[in-house]
Amino acid sequence: MTQPDYVHALNLPVPDELDPGMVKYFNICRDKLGLVPNVLQAYNFNQDKLKVFVAFYNDLMLADSGLSKLEREMIAVVVSSINRCFYCIIAHGAALRELSGDPVLGECLVVNYRVGELSERHRAMLDFAVKETERAHEIEESDRQQLRDVGFSDPDIWDIAAVVAFFNMTNRMASSIDMMPNMEYHSQNR
């Protein structure tokens, strides 16, 4: 079986040329990842939207935080799994496998994070992510306190909530336009 051979299902205009800053960013992606992620290609029809997306993603996923890059990818994968977002499960599953060096962890988080051998910290973080994804209106102080009890600070809790919220948005966007992951992600770091 193979996935469809397109970036997304919409017929959007492709600009004649990229903004110089985005050319540089796409080149960094090619150098570091060996590809330009299809999510960037999808946003490429509107340079302003592309710049906002890149800035927000980089702030949430790469900037200094009390959360490690691995922890942020763990959240991305679990949220995407709950939302059944094909693009993000595949793309962030590959990133998770690379950061952790553990393909089994990646598979556990995609299918059911509860079966994996996780630290108390990671289980509490992912339990919070699931609750925010499925029932954010039910989050109470006791949920935040559970995160504090395993070592997360209030700024860390903000970052957890922000990463969860971001992936809930991007999952819905990717699914709604039938965004396809780059084929390279399927075999990376296995």
Image (cartoon, grey):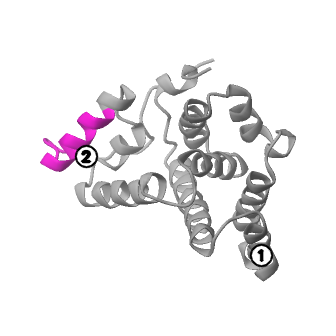
Query: Going 56% across and 51% down the picture, which residue do you hit?
Result: 68
Image quadrant containing the C terminus: top right
Depth check: give the residue in front, 62 or 172.
62
Query: Going 36% across and 44% down the picture, which residue do you hit?
Result: 40
Q: Amino acid at mark 1?
A: Gln
> Residue 4's spot in the image, x, y percent?
51, 27
> What whole-number distance in Å separates the C-alpha atoms at marks 2 and 1?
47 Å
> Sequence-wise, which precedes: disc 2 or disc 1?
2
Q: Which residues are magenta?
A: 15-29
- Residue carrying label 2: 13
Q: Amino acid at mark 2?
A: Pro
> Residue 46's spot in the image, x, y percent?
26, 55
**Disc 2 or disc 1, which is closer to the eye?**
1
Extreme residue in the right direction? 115
SS type, badge 2: loop
Magenta segment: does it hold 21? yes
Determine the image quadrant of residue 161: bottom right
How many numbered discs, if any? 2
- Residue carrying label 1: 145
